[in-house]
Amino acid sequence: MFKRRSVGVLVLVALTALAFSTRAARGQASNPMRDLFAALVEVLPYSFDEAAWQDPTNAERIEDGLADLAARASAIQRHGLGLNRSYGVARDALAADAREALSAYRNGDQRISRHIVRNVTETCFACHSRLPASESADLGSALADTIDLRQLDEVGTLRLLVATRQFGTAMSAAEAILVDPASHAADIDLMGIFESYLKVAVRVNRDYERPRAALWRFMQRNDLPLYLVDRVGDWIVALEELSEAAPPVDLQVATELLREANSRNEYLRDRRGLIHAIVASGLLHQFVQTAPDDELELAEAYYRLGIAESSISRTIWVPETEYFLETAIRIAPKSSHARNAYTFLEQYVLASYTGSAGTKLPEDVWNRLMRLRVLIDESE
């Protein structure tokens, strides 16, 4: 949520200008991903301003924009457009969200539709924070230049900047948050700033020195709880160790890094091994992009990706952990990797869906698990 209405208007103006520039670019040369982004920024500006979203004079434009977004996202979901299968979870999530946002808006549930559109950037973040990138997208530069990021919600700002591939600005925004006395150190951690920042720093920018310096500055705060003193100190050491020799894109190297990450975690939800897990996941993402012919290796890579993601991310908006584990099972259902992936998936899903909400899994979730179990059993 934005802290000041005037900032919401500023974002609306900036993104509307971005939408016009994107439409112009779309008219010059059709590109499915560019067109999808253009459709998104047609409606995204309105989602930042509740009054604008609910204004009847904007209803036709918003509905048309949502319909365009749903159509383009569904087309990419159906055809894939040559994207690696690792992007399947993002394609499916984006298409489902776009359809649900359109349906909710048409049914008069503006609150739900607006909430979905605002969170679509989380799906974009999941894709754009995976692989190394040498440059940012010009389409998002107007956004970074116009908005006073200090006035925006921290997590939403990072998601939006990475969604528009403004990686340098996203890094600077996160680093400002880490030393901002207006937010308590523990709150910064609970918001997931560390995970988001380190994904961009290490996986996208392949930079170990800059985040090490930023974390060291964070350590100078006088409001650090003891657990953060220990964890951040561990991360600084890990960044220094791993920076000495950039690990190659190799399945076994990634596996060893992930094992090291898990060995450093002394208890469930401990994050001493966060840096090693992020580096391992980056190598695994690059590995699956090579589309190796060996199905056993590919299944193992997706299994390891599921393990890594479960220890890195806190969001459940894009179910990457579940998708990677299911992909491992479907690639090589006869393999030990499939059985290991299913075993972990069962436990992960039970922990995610049960607890304070009860002990019964939703029927569709249970049926999905059973189909995967049958797939493994019939392959043996």
Image (spheres, rainbow, N blue to C red):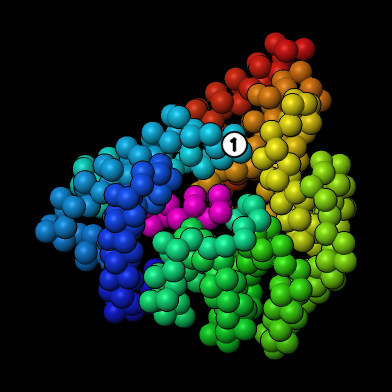
Quadrant of image for the C terminus: top right
Picture quadrant of residue 32: top left
Name the residue rendered at 53%, 46% in the picture. 318
Visible residue check, residue 353: no
**Taking 44 as reference, is 322 left or right?**
right
Name the residue rendered at 38%, 33% in the picture. 75
Residue type marked 1: Asn
Point out residue 299 in the picture as x, y percentages from the top left corner: 74, 30
**Taking 314 as reference, is 335 left or right?**
right
226 above or below 264? below
Quadrant of image for the N terminus: bottom left
Q: Main secondary structure of the magenta part?
A: helix
- SS class of the residue under badge 1? loop
Point out residue 329 in the picture as x, y percentages from the top left corner: 69, 26
State the residue in front, 369 or 27. Answer: 27
Local crowd at mark 1 within 10 Å, few (<14), some, or many (≥20)?
Answer: few
State the residue in front, 304 or 266. Answer: 304
**Taking 251 as reference, is 365 left or right?**
left
Point out residue 107 in the picture as x, y percentages from the top left corner: 21, 42
Residue picked out by circle 1 = 84
Name the residue rendered at 32%, 50% in the picture. 28
Picture quadrant of residue 301: top right
Which range is magenta?
117-128
Residue 27 in the magenta stretch? The answer is no
